[in-house]
Amino acid sequence: MLRTLLILIFFVGSLKAQIDFGKYFTEGALRFDYYHIGNAKNESIIFDKFIKEPFWSGSRVNLIDTFQYGAYFIKVRQPNSGKTLYSRGYSTLFREWQTTDEAKKITKAFQESVTFPFPKDSVVLEIYSRGGEGEFEKIFRMGINPKNYFIERLKPDGTVIKEYYSGMPSKRLDIALLAEGYTASQFGEFKSDCKRFTNYLFQYSPFDSSKNKINVWGVFTPSSESGADIPADSIWKKTALNSSYYTFNSERYLMTEDYFKVRDLAASVPYDAICILVNSSKYGGGGIYNYYAIVAAKNKKAKQIFIHEFGHSFGGLADEYYTSSVSYKNFYPKGIEPWEPNITTLVNFSKKWKDMIEKGTPIPTPPEDKYANVIGVFEGGGYVAKGVYRPSLNSLMRSFTSNEFNAVSKRALRRMIDFYIK
């Protein structure tokens, strides 16, 4: 009962009226770089540095997170009153690694960063971790003086491509496409790929009807060699962001652990969401909520990989499949409602898509042809066949035999777009 009360207090405190941006913040963003260290059972946040980035492209109205998505959550508070000035949820590669067998054997460090509008006066940064019962627990607290001369001033050196521009960044969703594994002589190739992936984005609902709410930027920095690392084949490339296949020993999981470099490159433009285009034809990609998406740009399925992974990184969507092997173990504990909007354990289904179920549709919903085109509650999702449910028989978050998001995911994505443009 006490735990439920604490969770309620946390959520209600995060749903208060939005903050007057001009009263508390100024131009630019403050980035907190840190190392996330731990193993399967423990975690610690180790301070590295503060950096002032030149742009804050996020909303200047919606500063308080109303979604409560992510494995982690930050709050920026006034030191004396405790008033929350900014908050945001996010997930990390570290949290995924914690569920692997390797995390049971060793302790490891991952680079991570969080950003928020540059404060006018001193603030307190708090980081919360979502525990095994689904509650947020504070794991870090640090006071910040924005006048501290040790805050580094970042001077981004990426070459900027203004690929698609619909309006002022603070009233748009700004997407940064980063170059990885493109040499200096392949700049034209990257520029073409930026256009291609922007066109891909606008082929899918709800992005197709939101073109006037989105900006897309390309950011190029040359790599010494083309491609990405493929450790199992003894292929090692010198690239700008050090991306690699076989992340967590999963061949198709293409990621980078050099997150500070990712953020440095993205800071060349106003950005709310990051997608890394890797100059590779080998199937692979990945996406983590409010972290980044990454895709093998030259693969024949690159369009669907990109949209699927962007669903993870931007919308917080979960995987709806359960037959493909992954390195994660017990990713969704029994008896806990997942935070992702498109899967459920039926523990708290009322806050998911219950309102979208047509009268007469059984819950759970049998995997029968007559329910192929309806929103239901189909068992299997989140990497397991039993106990986790998805909204439709098939969708882009389950299989590439489908080429669209289901209605539940579309609604979640639309709500996220609208959050950024106010």
Image: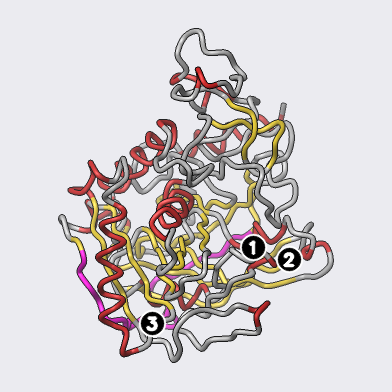
Query: What secondary structure is marked by label 1?
Result: helix
- Read off the residue under disc 2: 38
- In the rendered structure, which disc, 1 or 2, sits on the residue that comes first in sequence? 2
The reply, left or right, for residue 256 in relation to residue 99 is left
Give percent across and percent down for residue 285. 51, 62
Q: Earlier in the sequence, mark 2 or mark 3?
A: 2
Asked if marks 2 and 3 touch (Cβ < 8 Å), the reply is: no
Element type at marker 3?
loop
The amino acid type of the residue labelled 3 equals: Tyr
Residue at the spot of label 3: 182
Q: Residue at x 74, y 59 (%)?
A: 100
Q: Is residue 3 above or below residue 396?
A: above
User: How much space separates mark 1 and mark 2, taking CA atoms?
Assistant: 8 Å
In the image, the segment drawn in magenta is 140-163
Q: Nearer the viewer, mark 2 or mark 3?
A: 3
Q: Amino acid at mark 1?
A: Phe
Q: Which residue is depicted at the point 31% across and 89% down?
A: 185
> Mark 2: which amino acid?
Gly
Residue 152 shows in the view: yes
Residue placed at 64% from the left, 34% from the top?
380
Q: Quadrant of residue 7?
A: top right
Numbered tag placed on residue 94 in the rendering: 1
